[in-house]
Amino acid sequence: MDLKKACPKKLVDAETAMSKIKNGSRVFIGSGCGEPQHLIRTIVEDLNMQDIMLYQMLSWTFANYVDDPQFMKRFSLKLFFISAHMRKAAFEGKIDYIPTYLSQIPRYFANRRIVLDVALIQVSPPDKFGYCSLGVSVDITLAGMQNAKLVIAQVNPRMPRTWGDSMVHINEIDYLVPFEEPLVEARPHFKNPNVADRIGFYVNQLVDDGATIQIGFGHLPNTILGNLTDKRDLGIHTQLITDAFLPLLEQKVITNRKKTLHPGKVLTSMCMGSEKLYRYVDNNPMFSFCSSEFVNDPTVIALNDNLISISSALEIDLTGQVCTDSMGHLFYSGIGDQVDFLRGSAMSKGGFSVIALPSTAQNDQVSRIVPHLSEGAGVATTRGDVNFVVTEYGIAELSGKSIYQRVMELAQISHPKFREEIIAVAKTRHYIFSDQLPPTQDDLIFLERYKNQMPLKNGKIVEFRPLLPSDEFAYRNFFYSLQEKTIYFRFFYKMNLFSHEVVQKQWASVDYRKNMSIIGQVRIGGHQEIIAIGSYADEDEGNPRAEVAFVVREDFQGMGIASYLLAIMQPIAKENNFTGFMATVLRENKAMLRVFKKRYPNAKTIVTGGNEVSILMEFSDAVEWGRKVASDKSGEDDVCICPVPDTNRKEPFKP
């Protein structure tokens, strides 16, 4: 459309448009990489402008002026989020921060809690029907212009035309200022790549094929996305699109096919990145850009099944309270979309949230997992909203957990050098038992290669991993789910109690090189339950054989689980310099005797007296695990048709 013919009276230069703004006006500025840079520079350079109140979410261009005393006298800058460029100014008190949920900001404009006199926005040139596009910044910009008395738009040919709710007709704009310039480009600075990569490795374990993802901006979210290349059919419902999504889109990892809300579409609100990204979203019908009021509405988010929200934090305390927007009394970023998506993911069928953060700050001198939040720190996310927390040391699951369990989960993923201190402080707060031992100070990344999966004939999958101190309550529940006969076969007496003291003695502080317990878990009702455990221990210093034992819950017996556990544990024990296993078994426990004999046909059997039998097994004598272990028609726990356990995997991540 030729603007000179269609609306010549609206077509003006920036100086003329800015002259329409009265002193004392409340002015909304378009957000982030969609901000109208030319209009911003013009309003700042117009010395007639006095006592102007500026509202913006993400601010870039104003960072060039906040150190100018004259600018500060003429303008008052109010931000809904503090970008890295504005952080210094925020620390120095030069800007005003409005803490609020991103989904609520459009309503503040509509109900006039925040009154806007003018909106300065940036749009693409209009099409033949007169429709311009807000392009990479729909978010709160759409609501800002809809509720302003005067709308001035910079018309930039470089602004992409995006699909969704981004279209604005020229009749809705009072003045049009043609001016071509590159859009703001935003690329996060990468720091601590090894730490970020390890966090991405753990987050990968939580993301299933077909999930719908929300994730934010920064080096950590970018690295997490880079760790999802092995997934299939991911969907996207997120506030912000960055360059980190491009490889996943190009490799068809993101297809949006499994989404239950807007299938086939990336639902987003804004775009921040490079010119390559802006060209990718330009006129791309896969992307639907909508207002933050819609994209960030928890009830809308919840319409996505299997919605996984991934966000970051500055620190988290031992009860699960999260600070995201301040460092003590200093405002650092903003509440943004975290709470919206945490609550939306909690309501999503199969959905959940992940808080990802490095375990330390300031070159490992300060722990981000703390007994209490820093003085002045804001609680953006309450302890009731947090589900998973991930650091470079592992995954903590807090949802539905007691304070004791949360302390143990979080201590376990804190930096090793802070674990003893965390446990000590937790004792003084009476969060945990007074005799609680701290988790090992070892970096347990090596345990990741001991994880395996076993599909069962009934369609369930058993996931195997090493037992951790934080599993105390889950293991306790497993013990009390067993029948008396099963307990008797394992412990050789009618053990009625499995107390905290017993757990402390055996598993609270494990030397994983001398002792190993592998648990088998299945997903039941949306959570994992322990259904089996296999353990070996160095009971006799210097003995080349480790003592081994197994327990499988009754409803999972006869499925080959004990045989699978034995096959998994042999290479682990061999790696730790054992040459064989020994086991003490009750004579009447024929099923377990058969499991040992099948794998070690030349095992020595020694009758030790009474009702017990000792079995001595050499690893060199082991029969390799086959794809099918034939049944001897006993129906006992020696039958399995499943993939060979991957017992020779290399460590999955090397820092």
Image: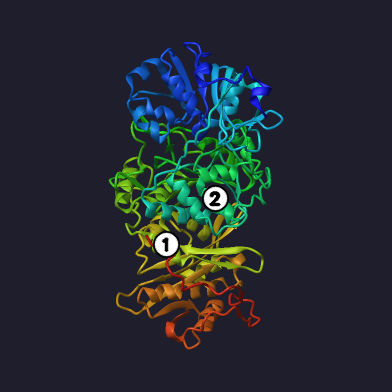
Q: Would residue 151 be found to the left or right of residue 321 on screen?
A: right
Mark 2 and mark 1 in contact? Answer it, CB < 8 Å. no
User: Disc 2 to disc 1, how far (Cα)?
Assistant: 24 Å
State whether residue 260 is above or below residue 471. Answer: above
Q: Secondary structure at mark 2?
A: helix
In this figure, which residue is indicated by the disc labeled 2? 246
Bin the neighbour count of mark 1 within 10 Å (Cα to Cα): few under 14, some 14-19, many 20 and up: some
State whether residue 413 is above or below residue 594. Answer: above
* Residue found 59% across the figure and 70% down from its top: 557
* Residue found 53% across the figure and 46% down from its top: 276
Per the rendering, the mark at residue 653 is 1
* Residue found 35% across the figure and 59% down from its top: 443
Bin the neighbour count of mark 2 within 10 Å (Cα to Cα): few under 14, some 14-19, many 20 and up: some
Residue occupying the far bottom of the picture:
602
Q: Quadrant of residue 374?
A: top left
Kind of residue at badge 2: Leu
178 or 548, nearer to the observer: 178
Q: Would residue 178 be found to the left or right of residue 49 on screen?
A: right
Kind of residue at badge 1: Phe
